[in-house]
Structure formats: structure tokens, C-alpha cells
Amino acid sequence: MPSSHKYFYALLITLAIFLGLTWLSNYFDAQRLNEVKAIDDSISLDILSSETQFDLLKETPCEDLGVSSLSQELDSLGSRLSFLETSRGTNDPQVIGLKLNYSLLEIKDFILMQSLSEKCHTKPVFVLYFYSNSGDCPSCSDMGAVLTALREDYPAVRVYSFDYHANLSAVDTLEKIYKVKDELPATVIHGKAVYGLQSLDAIEQLMPELSSLATTTATTTTSGQ
């Protein structure tokens, strides 16, 4: 085979590989963009939905109230957003925009749950968690894992997580209300900020009401068997 033919076939193979890799890159980029759009649409819809929930639940008897559907959706959206943040990076502009919208959705749910607690004379079990992805909080990922374990052990506990440095006035207002200092990780329990990495046992000691939640959960599980 003449050497010119060899070069020609080599060029064709190289071009085919290049075009194939380009197509794959564009395909995965499109998939990531679709994921971003899906989460953004979901958050936008739930923000609008939360306003309607406020009006509806004002007129609902306390005995008919269950867990907010918005609260349930938060867990799913939070997991998807965490995965997206890991795959695209914490500094990705689209991820940052989604985090801001998600933070707003969390705050709306927090306000809604507080309103229901006041209306129905129940004691809310909330935890506000402030973290940072800016490299100034080496313990934040470990603290996040502890709070994930807390939610798994006590599903009735609502954990709201916020980036301390988020460029969102609503988050700034939360930090001022609870006097959260730039000493991260910071966990607000019963309206007071606790700083540094906390173990699950330490949080359970700070929240004695968790024992009754565990009893309730165990009773419900036993009854359902």
C-alpha cells in the first residue's frame, strides 16, 4: 500500500475519533444543561406553589395537616443539587444560581412550618445549618454528614442548609436574626448558634425532644408491621 494511502487512512481515523469525541462532549453537555433546567424549573414551580400553600393551610384544621409537600420535595431537590454541585463544581455560575433559588425555597418552607406550628400549638423541630464551600471550612463536609445522619434517624426534624457566603439578602437576614458569626460550621438549634463540628450525640443532647420523636417513630413502625 502506498505511503500516501496510509496517511490518508490515518487522517480519516483521526478525524473520525475527533468527531466522535466532539459529539460525546456535546451530548453530555446537553444532558447536564437539561439537568440544570429540570432542577431550576422544579425549584421555580415550588417557590410559586409555596405561596399557594400558605393560603390553603391557613384554612385547614390542624388535625388534617400533614407534612408539607414542599418539605418533602426539598429533600429530593437537595440531593439532586448536591450531585450537580459535585459534578459541575461549586463555582459553576448555573449551580450558584440554583443554590440561591433553593435557599429561597428552604426559607419559604421554614416560614411555612413556623406558621403551622404557631397555628396548631406544636413545637417545631428545626435545625439551621450554615456552611461554606470557599475553602475556609474544612469541617463543613463532616458536619453535613452528621446532619444527614440526624435526618435519617429522626425524619420529623427539618434541617435547612445555607451557604454562609451566599449573595442572597434573605440568607443575610437569617444570619442577623440568629446572630450567626463567621465561625463555620454553624448550627442553629433552638434559636442559638453552636459553632464547630458537632457529633450526633452532642446534637441529641442539645435537643432532648428527639427522644420523644424516636419513640413516636418506633411506635409507628411497630404498628405498621
Image: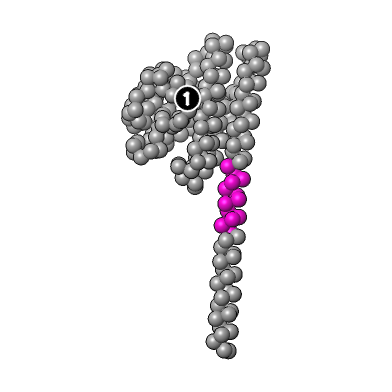
Say if the magenta span includes residue 35.
Answer: yes
User: What is the magenta range?
Assistant: 24-36
Residue at left offset 57%, top offset 51%: 29
Query: Residue 216, how many percent across, how many down?
Result: 52, 22
Label 1 amino acid? Ser
Residue 165 lies in the magenta stretch:
no
Name the element at disc 1.
helix
Q: Quadrant of the C terminus?
A: top right
Residue 23, x across and y down, in percent: 60, 60
Give the quadrant of the N terminus: bottom right
Residue topped by disc 1 = 169
Q: Position of residue 11 (x, y in %)?
A: 56, 75
Give the dominant element type of the magenta stretch: helix, strand or loop. helix
Q: At 62% from the left edge and 29% from the top edge, which residue is drawn?
A: 46
Q: Nearer the viewer, residue 175 or 144?
A: 175
Residue 187 in sight here: yes
